[in-house]
Image (spheres, grey):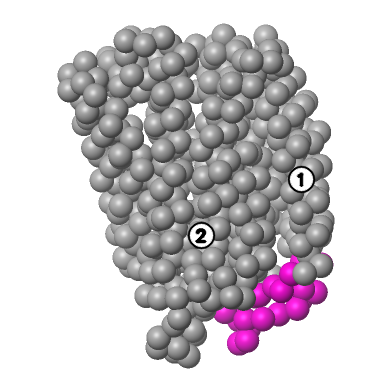
Amino acid sequence: MKHSWKMIGTSALGNALEFYDFVICGVFIAKISEVFFPNTSPTIALFASIFAFSAAFFTRPLGAYVFGLVGDTFGRKVALTYSVMLMGFPTLIISLLPGYNTIGIAAPIILVLCRMVQGLSTGGEYNGAAIFAIEHGKAKQVGLISGIIAGSCMVGAVFASFAGSLMLRPGMPDWAWRVPFLIGALVSFMGFVLRKNAKETDAFLHIAEKKKQQKSPMKVIFQKHKAAFLMNIGVGIFKGSLTYTVFGFMNVYMTKFLGHDMSTAVFLNVFGLLGYTSGCTFFGWLSDKITMRKSVYLSCFLCCTLSYFSFYLLQSKDLVLVGLGQYGVGLYVGSFVGLSHAFMQVLFPAETRYTGVAVSFSIGIAISGGFMPSVYTFMTGYSGNMYMAAIIISVYAIIFTTISRFYRHKAKLYSPAPHYANHNEKEEELKLA
């Protein structure tokens, strides 16, 4: 078991390093609007920057398919090793990319292309890291491991936010925002080394021994697991609406609607990221104790209640209360995200798990995650209602609760861990009832 936790730790660390690269663009979204989209109104520049940030979500499904196919055919380790490497190159390019005033329209075009390549990488990395970690663990700990992997993403985001808070301080040179991108490229290469020396999961080795040649994973999924595929798209949609509240919308909300300067907003957002990380770990662990179904319902309840209270605190003039509001936002978001990996893992058998989880989730996250910062920004500005994001999240939570109640009566669940020879355990054994 000591070896298993070493592999889980390696997966979590690599995931944190890659997510630092992915999030750093969102942290500096206001600065990017100045450098790559000048000569426009501040509002148009902001929306253009949000679009550039969102471009990564358009290519996530393609990356999920490519790396999913690699992961189900050649191994989880192979897919993860090269997905983290793919993240580093566009991050390096962004750190050195001249602005619009230097190379004209080529600057924003290259920026968008870099984000699209990052999306390819994330499509294979995010779910793949969780699959790799959970397959190295025990079935009775899938929730805890799920929470650790989900929380590790925000460890990278916390460091990105600290970098933003430091580099956006008054008096820093105009090029200071490029330094965190350069650091991100370097840490991606560190992630490559970590993954290169990792051990393949027993679950993949087991299916590799049984089948030298597999059918196309997507063909099998559409033949046998269509309901699971659709359900997981729903997970991606709901998760996207939550996650990108924390680091895609919060900085815009704090600056555009509440009047904080960017450095203060990024610093306060750290409390939201800490709430997210602790929420992921705690609620992931809790799902192992009280069953997955009850944990999902609890999370949806928190999204419908704690969200309003958190946005109330965010509007306070007291920065301590604002920080507490940020923590609350992160907490209710983490309550679902922390258990979501475990929820997704059991929907597909090991033979098609990487492709099934990654592709369906990426489709869902592309539908909601890439657009949600823009939707929240537009709806809040248009309506003047400072609780608009909480209202939208509540609607998503109610819809997801309804869908999950319907699906659980039809679900065929699989063990995500290699400790069961047949990889097909009953719902009661996985404590998902």
Q: Which residue is mark 1?
A: 399
Q: Position of residue 269 (x, y in %)?
A: 55, 27
Most common SS among magenta residues: loop
Q: Residue at x 53, y 21 (%)?
A: 252
Instruction: Name the N-terminal-most of marks 1 and 2.
Output: 2
Tell me the amino acid under the disc marked 1.
Answer: Ile
Image side of residue 86 versus residue 285, left or right: left
Q: Position of residue 402 (x, y in %)?
A: 81, 51
Q: Secondary structure at mark 1?
A: helix
Q: Is residue 29 above or below residue 346?
A: above
Indicate yes or no whether the magenta region holds residue 419.
Answer: yes
Image side of residue 302 versus residue 252, left or right: right
Quadrant position of the N terminus in the picture: bottom right
> Which label sits in the foreground, 1 or 2?
1
Q: Is residue 302 above or below residue 44?
A: below
Q: Residue at x 47, y 13 (%)?
A: 43
Q: Residue at x 53, y 23 (%)?
A: 251
Number of other residues with Cα within 10 Å of mark 1, as a class: few under 14, some 14 to 19, many 20 or more: some
Tell me the amino acid under the disc marked 2.
Answer: Ala
Number of other residues with Cα within 10 Å of mark 2, as a class: few under 14, some 14 to 19, many 20 or more: many
Image side of residue 408 versus residue 419, left or right: right
Q: Which residue is mark 2?
A: 358
The residue segment tinted magenta is 411-433
Structural distance between the alpha carbons of marks 1 and 2? 22 Å
Picture disc at residue 33? none
Q: Position of residue 423 (x, y in %)?
A: 62, 81
Q: Secondary structure at mark 2?
A: helix
